[in-house]
Amino acid sequence: MDIKTMKRLLSFCRPYMKYLYCALLCSSGQIVFTLLTPVFIGQAVDHIIGQGLVAFDLLFQKMIWILGSVLIAEIFDWLVVRLSNRMTYAITKDLRDQLFEKYETLPLSYIDSHAHGDLLSRMVNDIDLIGDGLLQGFTHLFNGIATIIGTICFMLYIQTTVALIVIVLTPLSLVVATIIANKTYKYFQEQLSLRGELGAYVEEMIGGVKVVKAYGYEQTNQERFEEINQRVYVSGVKSQFLGALANPSTRVVNNIVYASVCIAGSLYVIGGSMSVGALSSFLSYANQYTKPFNEISNVFTELQTALACASRVFHLLDIDSSPKQGSTKTLSHIQGHVQIQHLSFSYRDDEPLIEDFNVEAKPGQTIAIVGPTGCGKTTFINLLMKFYQPQHGQICIDGIDIQDMSSDYVRSLYGMVLQDSWLFQGSIRDNIAYGKKEATDQEIIEAVKKAHAHKFIIQLKDGYDTMISEEGGNLSQGQKQLLCIARIMLVKPPMLILDEATSSIDTRTEKQIQEAFDLMMEGRTTFIVAHRLSTIQKADQILVMNHGQIIEQGKHEELLKKNGFYHHLYYSQFEIQK
């Protein structure tokens, strides 16, 4: 068992110790009244001396006491479960809050390099299993330990020798359970990892189901899924088989103990040193004494799963997601003078991407970045936004290195429209006001009209109050992109980044949007990532990238006259033979 992970998991209990103390107190009360019941039963048996020799008054009195002790024990048991539930779900809530906060601050490089389905699985499935393990621990472990201690005291009081037989033999079941639990831990870890892989694959295939169907890859994907699912099955069978061994193994030991108590107790009754009622009570205690060991063995299995899940969650929480910050400088007056000096970046040490990159964007200039796929255009934008940290060099805004500014502040300086539009579940109004929550309806409508989205919005049944489904599933791709453009036009940021912002819009609307962008870009430094070269002909400077390097630089007409890479790229795109 991973003691370090267990200690850390238990540290989440600290804010809720009042529930733990109350649960322990109620558990103690429940055990006391549960253990009193066999005493009353034994006394009731002793009042049945023989045929015609039954003390009915005393027997009825004991029956009342038995009923009362059972009812009180059940009330305490209900309280234990109630308090344990409150504590467990409060802890899992805190874990999810912390994990979601971590997701919000994780470096983009980590998110890009890990399967989203696995990250989702840790948030939902793993924390659910942690909660199940904690619930088993609080409701069964506490109750079991209290039962064992209380039963030992009562048995020693009734008959010391027979009690010692039970005390010596019964812990063997716990030893057996512990050995099995230790062997199952690695299988539970493997199973959780495979579940994450399975979830990631399913999430990926559902997200791309149209492409899958278009290329007829259903059978291939089914085979791949069955291969992963088979590994999940094999791992699950191994872990559950070993986990299932714990309970029957402990029951065998417990039945041996029970038989030994019957034999030894009967001999003492025959010898006259124990009454039949006392033996009856003792057998009840022996049975109760073995049950907690069975429950504890089940708890070990649940805890193994919970600890394996917790280790996966803690691994994410321990990732250093705070970029190194110097002073958190800000700009009193933003001019938009961007200087990139000797910038170098690579995703892998053995595969350099951007090397000794130098660019200057003067205030109000429009800088277009073009080049083949994989040349580093999007990476350059990610560096501008401080999503990634460069290995060498610096990026300065108005003379201040962005490493001396907070990430939030740097990102607030740019308005960004991506090729992949993103909308959340909510109204159209809320989606547009995402970057400016205090915006008035008049400001929202003004921004929407500039984005040429007002016409299609008012044609919807609920207009601006129309609820958008998950990822904008009830809107066309072009409509979603128009809303994203309206979102930026509402914010009016000091600088702009447009990553093929009109790629999903028809030609006529694109022309109108481009006019709105031209108006918005006046006086603002703008970086445009373009695939359609027709959209960047008016740029003040065009950077032609290839293999992470600027191989050509200049205005549209200048680059065409050079008869170089840009010239070839431009005319091949429009299929014009020179």
Image: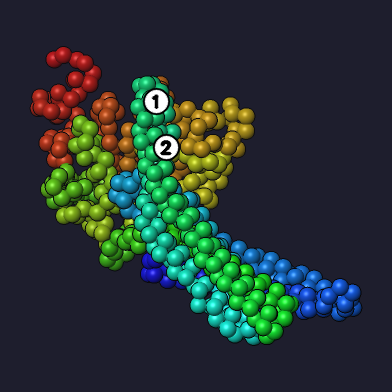
Residue highlighted by disc 2: 202
Asked if marks 2 and 1 touch (Cβ < 8 Å), the reply is no
Is 12 situated above or below 406? below
- Mark earlier in primary sequence (2, 1): 2
Picture residue at 13% right of the left edge, 28% below the top: 565
Q: Which mark is residue 218?
A: 1
Does residue 240 show up? yes
Is 254 situated above or below 530? below
Q: Quadrant of residue 100?
A: bottom left
Does residue 133 show up? no
Q: Nearer the viewer, residue 88 or 81?
A: 81
Residue 367 x, y percent position in the rendering:
24, 39
Is 156 situated above or below 533? below
Say which element carries label 2. helix
Picture residue at 28% right of the left edge, 36% below the top: 529
Look at the image and tell me in which quarter the N terminus lies.
Answer: bottom left
Q: Residues within 10 Å of mark 1 (few under 14, many from 20)?
A: some
Residue 286 x, y percent position in the rendering:
61, 72
Picture residue at 18% right of the left edge, 25% below the top: 569
Q: Nearer the viewer, residue 131 or 360?
A: 131
Q: Residues within 10 Å of mark 2 (few under 14, many from 20)?
A: some
Say which element carries label 1. helix
Q: Residue furthest top?
A: 577
